[in-house]
């Protein structure tokens, strides 16, 4: 392994492509104690929370959502779902699972999901509709039969959908707010070279920097360590030194 390797920084982050699913699934298992089955003949991952109330399923489904989270709270009013399309950046999904497994997430149950968007200059409306400054991401709340749901869609052109996130209206607002905060963040997402080949170039700021190879190799392990420390209440690991500044643009 060489000492330094190239890594792409992609902005806006909602156009960065899906990334590595392990960013979501491995910390759920190793840091949050979610159990998983073993079915090597099926291209799917199923993880269950320790209390067996919440299930994450990652399963290829042509024309449908690949990621699904379902929660059974003992009654219809306490049960909810969330789902994400195949090309949803895993960092946005991880924001949801990190909030879900945060011991303090109930304290944010009344959070306003559009507030992080408004702070970043997104158009927001009292009814929950919102739009990114470039018009690529749109969100709306739809009420049907007394129940409302969130639909958040990234589309580069009319009818050309990149991904969609859906949230049941009964989901704690703090979990949706965790997603919208990750969605609106101006911090670029990092991708290895092979994950940049299928990205559309229009509307994307794609920069490259050289980073220590060990930082990339151990990024997931560091994430697991931080989440484990959060769950157990132990001191978090020491922060990493600042990364080098970007060196070139493509």
Image (cartoon, helix red, strand yellow):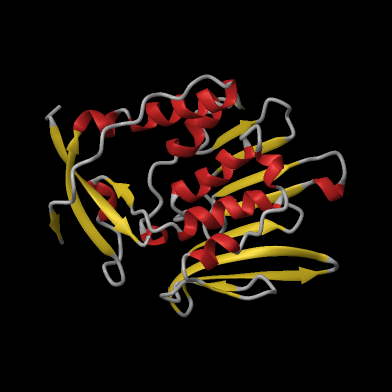
Residue 25, placed above or below residue 141: above
Q: Residue furthest right?
A: 75
- Residue under the image location 70 percent in, 37 percent down: 54
Q: Position of residue 241 (x, y in %)?
A: 26, 33
238 or 204, which is in the foreground? 238
Q: Quadrant of residue 244?
A: top left
Assign the N terminus to one quadrant of the image.
top left
Relative height, residue 115 to residue 82 (above, below): below
- Identify the residue at horizontal 72%, vertical 53% (top origin): 110
Give how far across and how far down residue 243 sits, in percent: 23, 40
User: From the viewer's perspective, is 210 left or right of 71?
Assistant: left
Q: Quadrant of residue 34?
A: top right
Q: Quadrant of the C terminus?
A: bottom left
Indicate the position of residue 23 as horizontal and vertical percent values: 44, 37
Give whichever of 158, 171 is nearer the camera: 171
Instruction: Give coordinates of residue 232: x percent, y percent.
Output: 58, 20
Side of 191 relative to 65 (left or right): left
């Amino acid at each position: 392994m060489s000492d330094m390797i190239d890594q792409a920084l992609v902005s806006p982050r909602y156009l960065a492509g899906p990334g590595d699913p392990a960013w979501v699934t491995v910390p759920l298992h190793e840091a949050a104690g979610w159990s998983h089955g073993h079915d090597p003949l099926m291209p799917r991952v199923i993880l269950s929370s320790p209390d067996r109330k919440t299930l994450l399923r990652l399963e290829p489904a042509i024309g449908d959502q690949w990621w699904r989270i379902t929660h059974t709270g003992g009654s219809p009013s306490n049960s909810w779902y969330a789902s994400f399309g195949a090309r949803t950046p895993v960092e946005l999904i991880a924001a949801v699972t990190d909030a879900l497994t945060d011991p303090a997430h109930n304290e944010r149950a009344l959070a306003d999901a559009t507030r992080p968007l408004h702070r970043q200059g997104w158009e927001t409306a009292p009814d929950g509709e919102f739009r990114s400054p470039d018009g690529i991401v749109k969100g709306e709340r739809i009420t049907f039969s007394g129940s409302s749901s969130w639909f958040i869609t990234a589309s580069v052109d009319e009818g050309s959908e990149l991904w969609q996130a859906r949230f049941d209206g009964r989901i704690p607002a703090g979990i949706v707010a965790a997603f919208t905060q990750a969605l609106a963040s101006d911090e670029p997402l990092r991708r290895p070279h092979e994950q940049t080949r299928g990205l559309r170039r229009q509307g994307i700021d794609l920069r490259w920097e050289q980073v220590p190879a060990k930082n990339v190799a151990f990024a997931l392990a560091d994430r697991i360590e931080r989440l484990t420390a959060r769950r157990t209440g132990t001191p978090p690991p020491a922060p990493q030194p600042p990364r080098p500044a970007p060196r070139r643009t493509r």
